[in-house]
Image (spheres, rainbow, N blue to C red):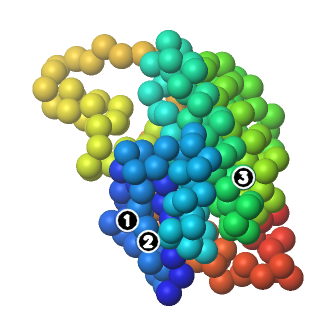
Amino acid sequence: MQRILILGAAGQVGSALLAQGIAGADLIGRAARDIDITDPAALAAALAATQPALVINCAAFTAVDRAESEAERAFAVNARGAGLVAQACADHGLPLIHLSTDYVFDGSKPAPYTETDPVAPLGVYGQSKAEGEARVRAALPQHLILRLSWIFSNSHPSFFGTMLRLGAERPELRVVNDQIGGPTFAGHIALAIAAMAGRALHHGDNSRADTIWG
């Protein structure tokens, strides 16, 4: 049975992946308290110790508003950390599934965004994630990047959950009304990642790599 290392395993998607499992794989979860992805030595040690066939990077600084006042930390994790994870995977010959966000776009497009649309982040969070994507692409050809939107789950606080709670408690809600998002259940994201991981693990030979990695 092949091993998959999940970084950021205590978050919504990481927790959903561990709870769901991936067929034919032994999942090894590591939270931020276990591995600092901004530390190259820690990443190298983790890969050497776990010997995974695939890495899924769910680790991120996700506090969108706080990123404006903690830009250094946001860029350290979301940009430099993402690049270091990708470089560690490249050093060990491992593919990577990396989680990003729709905040890499500016929201001005009047139709759904596609993978080929140019990024234009407006805030620090989106800027740090966009730079992280660029670093992943530069360091590792064998990667998949998933841009996620408004994640919610039963086990973690989220905007969606907060709105449901407040809607049950109050006759009227006062929130911003100029944002459009697509609330996405973490369990559904986990199912999609599991399918991608299964294909990656079963089609990892060089002769068929382009069918998975681009």
Estimate the x, y position of residue 108 in percent, counting from the top left. 69, 23
Within-10-Å neighbours for mark 2: few <14, some 14–19, many 20+: many
Tell me if 117 is positioned left or right of 144 in this view: right
* Quadrant housing residue 203: bottom right
SS under mark 3: helix
Callout 2 touching callout 3 (CB < 8 Å): no
Which residue is more in the foreground, 182 or 32? 32
Estimate the x, y position of residue 157 in percent, counting from the top left. 29, 37
Tell me if 27 is positioned left or right of 139 in this view: left
Residue 214 badge? none
Within-10-Å neighbours for mark 1: few <14, some 14–19, many 20+: some
Amino acid type, label 3? Gln
Q: Nearer the viewer, mark 1 or mark 2?
A: 2
Which residue is more in the foreground, 87 or 65? 87
* Quadrant housing residue 82: top right
Residue 87 badge? 3
Q: Is residue 145 visible?
A: no
Q: Nearer the viewer, mark 1 or mark 3?
A: 3
180 lies above or below 84: above
Q: Which residue is mark 1?
A: 18
Q: Which residue is mark 2?
A: 27
Q: Earlier in the sequence, mark 2 or mark 3?
A: 2
Amino acid type, label 2? Leu
Amino acid type, label 1? Leu
Q: Nearer the viewer, mark 2 or mark 3?
A: 3
Per the model, the C-alpha gap separating discs 2 and 3 is 21 Å
Q: Residue at x 53, y 51 (%)?
A: 42
Q: Earlier in the sequence, mark 1 or mark 3?
A: 1
